[in-house]
Amino acid sequence: MTAVHVTVWDDRNGGGADTPALFVHNIFTWGDDPEYGFAGQRPLTADRPLLLMDRRGYGDSPDTARSDFEVDAEDVVGLLGTGAHLVGHGNGGVVALLDRVRGLTPTVTDDATPERFLRESTESVGLPVPPLRCGFG
């Protein structure tokens, strides 16, 4: 199997988590593309290593005749190692789903209320918690 290019960012300085986050990009971009890729996520490297994959035919990965989600998913499996948080955007999200992920962020437990789900899915990414205005729960 041809290896894909991966940019590794790790600014933990001896602290933070060992489990990396693997980012899989959408079309018309690549992993560390400063405008449409994941370059804006660089501050997360203070907490954990980030692996920014260039899918085949993008960035510094080998060219391909056509994009293939299943081949991309095999590449992702090869990069996950003993485990990683998997983040997919657009077509990268399709690849992540084909990888038969065990869970998607945010993780919802049986005791989750709509309020708790909303809080955990916004606070975890640094967003303010919006008011709950729906009729479920």
Image (spheres, rainbow, N blue to C red):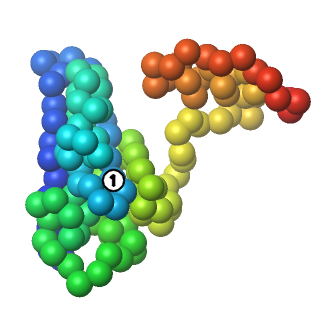
Name the spot of residue 20 as percent of width and height, x first.
Answer: 28, 38
Residue 68 vs 32, above or below: the answer is below
Q: Residues within 10 Å of mark 1 (few under 14, many from 20)?
A: many
Locate the C terminus by quadrant. top right
Q: Is residue 78 visible?
A: no
Q: Quadrant of residue 113?
A: top right
Above or below residue 36? Residue 30 is: below
- Could you tell me which residue is drawn at 20 percent across and 40 percent down? 34
Closest to the observer, 37 or 101 = 37
With 49 as the anchor, is 136 left or right in this view? Answer: right
Residue 84 picture location, percent across and down: 34, 44
Which residue is nearer to you in this view: 83 or 73? 73
Q: Is residue 117 visible?
A: yes
Disc 1 element: strand
Percent across and percent down for residue 133 are 80, 23
Tell me if 65 is positioned left or right of 94 in this view: left
Residue type of the residue flagged with mark 1: Val
Q: Which residue is mark 1?
A: 24
- Residue appearing at x 25%, y 24% in the figure: 43
